[in-house]
Every structure is written in C-alpha cells, then in structure tokens.
Image: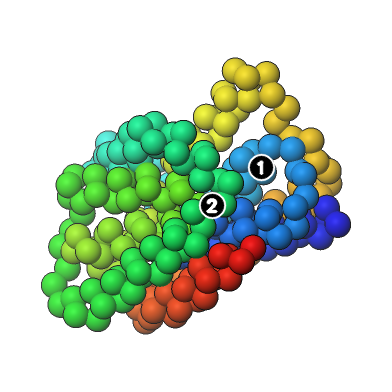
Amino acid sequence: MELVYFIFLGIVQGLTEFLPVSSSGHLVLLDKIFGVETGNFIFVSIMLHIATLFSVVILYRKEIFDLIRHPLQKKVRFLVVSTFFTGIVFLAFKSFFLNAFGGGLLPVCFMVTAILLMLTYFKTQNQKMYCGMTYLKATGIGLMQGVAVLPGISRSGSTIFAGTMLGLGSDEATSYSFILSIPIILLSLVYEVYDCVKNSSVIFTGSVPSLIISIVLAFLCGIFAIKIMKRFAKTKKYYIFSIYLAIIAIVSCFI
C-alpha cells in the first residue's frame, strides 16, 4: 500500500506543481485518502518539490545559466525581491500555514484558486497592452506566492494571476513563475532541515526505495507539466483549471 501511495504522490506532485491546481493541496488530499503514515509529511513534500525543481532547471537551463553568469542583472534582483516578500508572509503567518496542512481549509483554498484562475482568464482575454517587470510587481508576485503556502492555493496559479493582473503578458508571467519556484524551494529545504535538527525530530520514517521512485516520477511528470503549461500560456484557457478546481473543492468537502 505504501508503494502505491508513493507512486501516486510522485505523479500527482509532478503534474500539479506547474499546472495551476496546487500540488500541496493535492498531496494533502491524497494523504487523507490513503491515510498512510510516511514519517514527516512536510519533508516528503519538500523532497518531491526538489524533484520538480530539477524539471525547471532542465527546461529553463539557458535562462538560469544566464542569471548565474550575470548575478547583478535586474531579473535576479526581481527574483530576490519576490522571494523576500514570500518569506515575510510565511514568517508572519507560519503557525496558521502549518496548521492548514491538516486539510481543514482545502475546499475553501481550492475554490479560491479556481476564482483566481477565472479572473486570470478574463484578464488575458481583454489584455491589449503589456508592461515589463518592476520592483512593485515583483513585490506583489512575492506576496501572492507567500499566500500560496496554504495547501489548495496554487503557487504557479497565484503568481501567474498576480503577474497578469499587474500587467505582465501571459508568457512572461508563466516563465517568471517557474523560475521563481527555484529559490523558494531551496529555502524551504533549508528551513525544513533546520527545523528537524532544532527539534531533534526524525526527518523520514517511510520506505526509502518508495520515496526514490516517487521522486523520479515527480521529476518526469514535472517536465511534462511544464510543457503543457507553456501551451496554456499561449492559449490562455485558464478556465479549464477553474472548472477542475471547483469540482475538487466540492469533492474535498466529503473526504
């Protein structure tokens, strides 16, 4: 049963991390359905996020290498600003966010994401003029990403929503959202390791081979999901995800 659970975890994480449907929300929902004890759930979630991080690195390697070669360019500063404000939101509401992983807010959060995506759809349909990134926009995107710590609030969906509402084109908002996932995932890993060491808690008590299989699946499905999402950024049919999330929100009320 645990192996099947981890296979589902890897597939769900890989597909939902970059599709705007909330990977953490789906992982919590899956955890409630299976009811399998996997040790530290937050740690498992972060490991799967790292797997999908490599999906971003592979597909956006040219942009990432350019950022590394020119660390003082504006885009790097924008990413730093966004990440900083994400951290501020997390630290300010840390206890509330962590308690939300119990799943009590899943229906509400899924529905909120559905609404955000529907608003994004209408915005992109009527958007004629696009404005470039600014520090103010980077701040807004970072704040929205902070709120997306809540399971059920999509990180990619909320940051793409913020970007488009602030005047970015759909393609630019999507690309920025994907690259922005890298620093926040790395910082999440550092925080989790620190928290485990500080509290002398066991990081993981489940099956290591099952976890490895889950990580590989998350990586492969992550690559597939990014390619699918890049197509949606062109077609701008975000309402499809809104419909799906509205259904999941209703279903999660009974789980």
Residue 169, disc:
none
- Tell me which residue sits at (33%, 66%) in the image: 116
Q: Give the amino acid at mark 2.
A: Gly
Neighbourhood count class around disc 2 (C-alpha, 10 Å): few under 14, some 14–19, many 20 upward: few
Name the secondary structure under disc 1. helix
Establish if 153 lies above or below 39: below
Front-most of residues 90 and 246? 246
Mark sitting earlier along the chain (1/2): 1
According to the picture, the residue beneath numbered tag 2 turns out to be 104
- In the rendered structure, the answer to whether residue 104 lies left or right of residue 209 reads left
Residue pointed to by mark 1: 41
Q: Nearer the viewer, residue 64 or 212?
A: 212
Which quadrant would residue 238 be assigned to in this image?
A: bottom left
Q: Who is closer to the viewer here, 54 or 103?
A: 103
Lateral position of residue 13 relative to residue 5, left or right: left
Q: Residue at x 30, y 38 (%)?
A: 85
Residue at the front extreme of this rendering: 254
The amino acid beneath tag 1 is: Phe
Residue at position x 26%, y 78% from top?
A: 122
Q: Quadrant of residue 29?
A: bottom right
- Residue 208 at what x, y percent from top left? 81, 42
Give the image location of residue 138, x and y in percent.
25, 48
Task: Kindly indicate the quadrant of the structure image that contains residue 220.
Answer: bottom right
Mark pair 1, 2: CA separation: 16 Å
